Image: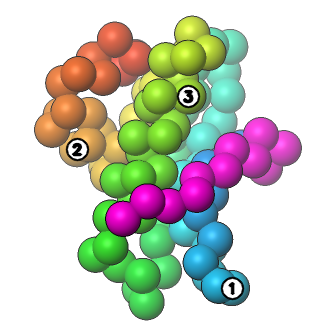
Amino acid sequence: MNYKVEHNAQECRFEVYIEDLISEINYIKKGDVLVVTHTGVPNELAGQGIAAAMTKHMLEYAREHGLKIKPVCPYTEAYLVRHPEYGDVWAK
């Protein structure tokens, strides 16, 4: 399923809104690195691929803007391990 992922730079997060529920990836920007601190999807929306869609969007955003991703969030790190095609944006 396709989800509309928005980058909310003011709040330092990537978001998906479905009805009145928000899924999000939070980060802290340190220079050219996005330190990913949390990925959250409400229980009502779990298992629908929303976290994966947001993570892919964030990684593509990082690639397009010359940024690196440093995962503190276990979900983001696991996604990067499963998707080595994003190794160029992983700040190890």
Taking the spot 77% from the left edge, 40% from the top edge, the residue there is 9
- Seen in the picture, residue 5 relative to 61 is either above or below; the reply is below
**Helix, strand or loop status at disc 3:** helix
Residue 4 relative to residue 3: left or right: right
Where residue 48 sits: x, y (%)? 32, 73
- Decide if residue 73 is in sight here: no
**Helix, strand or loop status at disc 2:** helix
Taking the spot 51% from the left edge, 46% from the top edge, the residue there is 37
Identify residue for label 2.
78
Residue 39 relative to residue 76: left or right: right
Identify residue for label 3.
61
Which portion, as a residue range, is magenta?
A: 1-11
- The quadrant in which residue 12 appears is top right
- Taking the magenta stretch, the answer to whether it contains residue 22 is no
Q: Name the one closer to the observer, 49 or 24.
A: 49
Ranked by sequence position, the earlier of labels 1 and 2 is 1
Identify residue for label 1.
20
Q: Amino acid at mark 3?
A: Tyr
Q: CA distance from mark 3 to mark 1?
A: 25 Å
Q: CA distance from mark 1 to mark 2?
A: 28 Å
- The quadrant in which residue 86 appears is top left
**Helix, strand or loop status at disc 1:** loop
- Seen in the picture, residue 40 relative to 30 is either above or below; the reply is below
Ranked by sequence position, the earlier of labels 3 and 2 is 3
Ranked by sequence position, the earlier of labels 3 and 1 is 1
Classify the position of the N terminus by image quarter.
bottom left
Q: CA distance from mark 3 to mark 2?
A: 18 Å
Taking the spot 20% from the left edge, 33% from the top edge, the residue there is 83
Question: Nearer the observer, disc 3 or disc 2?
Answer: 3
- Seen in the picture, residue 45 relative to 64 is either above or below; the reply is below
